[in-house]
């Protein structure tokens, strides 16, 4: 039989996964708003961000309740603290999706420009990173987290290429600088989302490799006298 | 006589204050590197960022040790969790100072441009916000935190004005777009630092107003059955 504490941990994992799904959906919607020049999609991002913020609050409360409920074992303590960090990363992802959607609204109001940057491809890479990072945490698999770090350098390269192409377009079409700047800032928001995924993955690697917690997560009620922090 | 736990809390506060000082110094140095076009100052920012990262790790470890040491009272639990969040904000401030210093290095290698944006004034505002936010936390004064939020709207306005002026300069001097973009990205990094200060201040307000903890911080060993989270 699972204890009340274990049930709390189960709920925490479920809610974090749900929050990750919301963050991913917000990224995809924001990119759609950009691609389709559709302000209504941007509006949906703004509404979802509010739900993401509520979800962040709920997860924070649940985590603190769990920590306050009883003296958690060191492994559980580390797990819950990691949840708090990841929760905050996911909330920032929601903010960045809003930034992208706002830029999409600006762009939809201006004449269309030719964009030499594949924002859709970048978006797919970035939302995959978020999903994988969360998977790596919930399954405590450092090899999945490692794959996220490798994707980050690809996204960094995309961002640098986007910068160069967009500066070229601005020089060629100074009258459209404002619109190209919007695209440039979208690519930077995407890259910042990738950074949040990377933060999560780095925490997972440190946590898993630091004190092989891989098998302990699910057997979390076992005594653990090692109080080494998880990062 | 102070208990081992209370001594731990004292050390935590001291180290957080020290970390805040390092983050502030990094912001000022990065802005100096920009203003004086001095790559050596930028180098100092890169070196200090390493120290900030070490300090983040130390504070994280100390916090987790404190949480693991004994079942903390709810007030102490909330305090230590707030330290963990603020610690992470300060570490990001260090990263943003590095971004600014990197842009300063780029700019120093290009011919000087006329910049219609007062980066120095913006830097002063932003580093003051970081200092005040930390003060508001350590003194549990929500009115100081409130002043930080008000400064944030001023910095936001500075960033918007910078954006408009710099787009104007780019249109007028397309051959210098790259350099103006560097300045634009510096102003955005400063605004992101202000956002981190705002995060800290918002946490403090929620924490202080949510469950009047104002007087409990220093009397931290008192029992407290209210397990409402601090944000």
Image (cartoon, coloured by chain):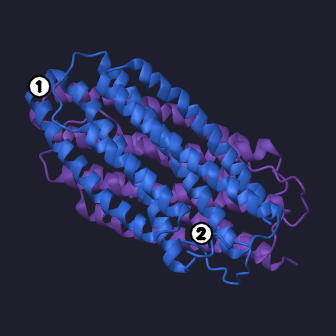
Chain colours: A blue, B purple
Q: Where on the picture, by quarter, is residue B163?
A: top left
Residue B3 badge: none
Which residue lies most toward the front here? A1
Left or right: B124 as drawn, with respect to B200: left
Chain to which mark 2 belongs = B
Q: What element carries label 2?
A: helix
Q: Where on the picture, by quarter, is residue A65?
A: bottom right
Q: Does residue B128 sit above or below B156 in this rendering?
A: below
Residue at 66%, 62% (x, y): give it.
Answer: A80
Q: Where on the picture, by quarter, is residue B116?
A: top left
Location of residue B65 in the rendering, given as x and y in whole percent from the top left corner: 68, 76
Q: Is mark 1 on a helix, strand or loop?
A: loop
Of residue A133 and residue B142, the one placed in the foreground of this image is: A133
Give the residue at mark 2.
B60
The span from disc 2 to disc 1 (Cα, nearest Å) is 49 Å
Left or right: A16 as drawn, with respect to A32: right
**Disc 2 with disc 1 on a shared chain:** no
Neighbour class for label 2 at 10 Å: few (<14), some, many (≥20)? many
Chain to which mark 1 belongs = A
Q: Does residue B38 sit above or below A227 in this rendering?
A: above
Residue at 39%, 46% (x, y): give it.
Answer: A127
Location of residue A146 in the rendering, given as x and y in whole percent from the top left corner: 38, 67
Give the residue at mark 1.
A173
Whether residue B195 is visible here, answered yes or no, is: no
Of residue B212 and residue A220, the one placed in the foreground of this image is: A220
Left or right: A183 as drawn, with respect to B19: left
Residue at 39%, 55% (x, y): give it.
Answer: B97
Location of residue B64 in the rendering, given as x and y in whole percent from the top left corner: 66, 71
């Amino acid at each position: 039989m699972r204890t009340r504490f274990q049930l709390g941990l189960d709920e925490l994992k479920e809610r974090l996964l749900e929050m990750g799904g919301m963050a991913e959906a917000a990224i995809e919607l924001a990119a759609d708003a950009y691609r389709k020049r559709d302000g209504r999609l941007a509006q949906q991002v703004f509404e979802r961000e509010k739900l993401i913020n509520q979800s962040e609050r709920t997860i924070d409360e649940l985590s603190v309740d769990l920590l306050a409920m009883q003296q958690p074992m060191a492994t559980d303590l580390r797990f819950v603290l990691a949840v708090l960090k990841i929760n905050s990363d996911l909330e920032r992802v929601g903010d960045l999706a809003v930034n992208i959607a706002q830029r999409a609204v600006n762009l939809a109001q201006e004449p269309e420009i030719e964009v030499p940057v594949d924002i859709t491809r970048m978006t797919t890479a970035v939302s995959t990173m978020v999903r994988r990072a969360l998977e790596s945490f919930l399954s405590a698999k450092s090899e999945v987290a490692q794959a996220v770090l490798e994707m980050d350098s690809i996204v960094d390269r995309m961002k640098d290429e986007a910068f160069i192409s967009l500066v070229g377009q601005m020089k060629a079409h100074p009258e459209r600088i404002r619109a190209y700047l919007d695209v440039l800032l979208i690519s930077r928001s995407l890259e910042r989302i990738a950074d949040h995924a990377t933060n999560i993955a780095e925490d997972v690697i440190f946590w898993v490799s630091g004190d092989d917690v891989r098998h302990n997560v699910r057997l979390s009620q076992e005594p653990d006298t090692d109080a080494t922090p998880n990062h």
